[in-house]
Image (tube, rainbow, N blue to C red):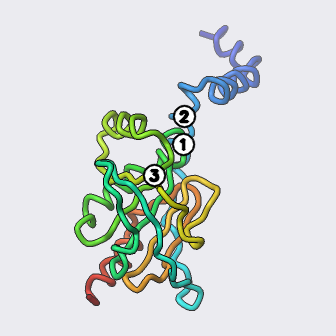
Amino acid sequence: MKKIIAFYKKHSNLIFLGIIALILFVPSIRMPVQVALNRLFSFSPKEIESKEQTILEDWNWQLVNQAGQKVWFIDSKGSPVFVNFWATWCPPCVAELPELQALYDDYHKVVDFFFVTNESPERVEAFLTKKGYSIPIFYPITAPPSLLESNALPTSFLFSPKGQLNRKKTGAANWNSEAVRNTIDNWLEKK
C-alpha cells in the first residue's frame, strides 16, 4: 500500500494530465463530462430590465414541425413564447434539456415552445427517443426574425404575451428556475 501511495505522490501530475487528456480527446468521455460541467454551472437566466426589453415586431417566420406540417410563428403572437436554438451534438444544449423538458411539461398548454434545430429529423428523433424527451421540435424554412438571430448554441429567448423579450441567454441555463416560473405565472395571471 505504501508503494502505491509513494507512486501516486511521485506521479500525481502525470496522472492528472492523463485524466485531462482522456476527457479532452476521447469523445465518449468528453461529451458526458462537458454536459455535467454545464449542468453544474447553469443558473437562471437574468430578466432583462423592463426599459431594455425589446418588442418583437417581426413575427414572419416559417417552420416545419416533427410531423412535417408548416407552422407560422405569427400564430403565437399574443401568447408567452419560448424559443430555443439547439443541437444534439452541443454539450451545453444537452445539459439544459432536462430543465427545459420539465418547464415544457408544466407549461406547454399555456406557453408556445419552439425547439429549433437544423439537424436531420432522423438524428433528432433518435436522440429524443433515447433520452426520453417529448419537447416539440421545429425546423426552419425561412430565416428567423432578426431579433432571434444567433450564431451560438444554445441560444434561448422568452417573450411575454405582448412580445417583449424578457430573457435571452446564450449558453446553458436553468430555464426551469423559480424566477422564470414566477415570470410566466405573473403573465398568466394578467390574462
Q: Which mark is residue 91?
A: 1
Q: Circle 3 is placed at which residue position?
A: 96
Residue 31 is marked as 2
Secondary structure beneath label 1 = helix
Marks 1 and 3, the one that precedes in the sequence: 1
Position of residue 13 in the picture relative to residue 104 (left or right): right
Above/below status of 11 relative to 145: above
Secondary structure of the residue carrying tag 3 is helix
Dot placed on the residue nearer the N-terminal end, 1 or 2? 2
Task: Say which quarter of the image contains residue 2.
Answer: top right
In this rendering, position of residue 74 left or right of residue 44: left
Residue 30 seen in render: yes
The answer to whether the residue labelled 2 contacts the one labelled 3, judged by CB atoms less than 8 Å apart, is: no
Label 2 secondary element? helix
Residue positioned 29% across, 48% down in the render: 67
Would you call the spot at circle 3 few (<14 residues within 10 Å), some (14-19), or many (20 or more)? many
Residue beneath the point at 47% across and 45% down: 94
Work out whether residue 71 or residue 1 is closer to the camera in this orientation and state it: 71
Q: Residues within 10 Å of mark 1 (few under 14, many from 20)?
A: many
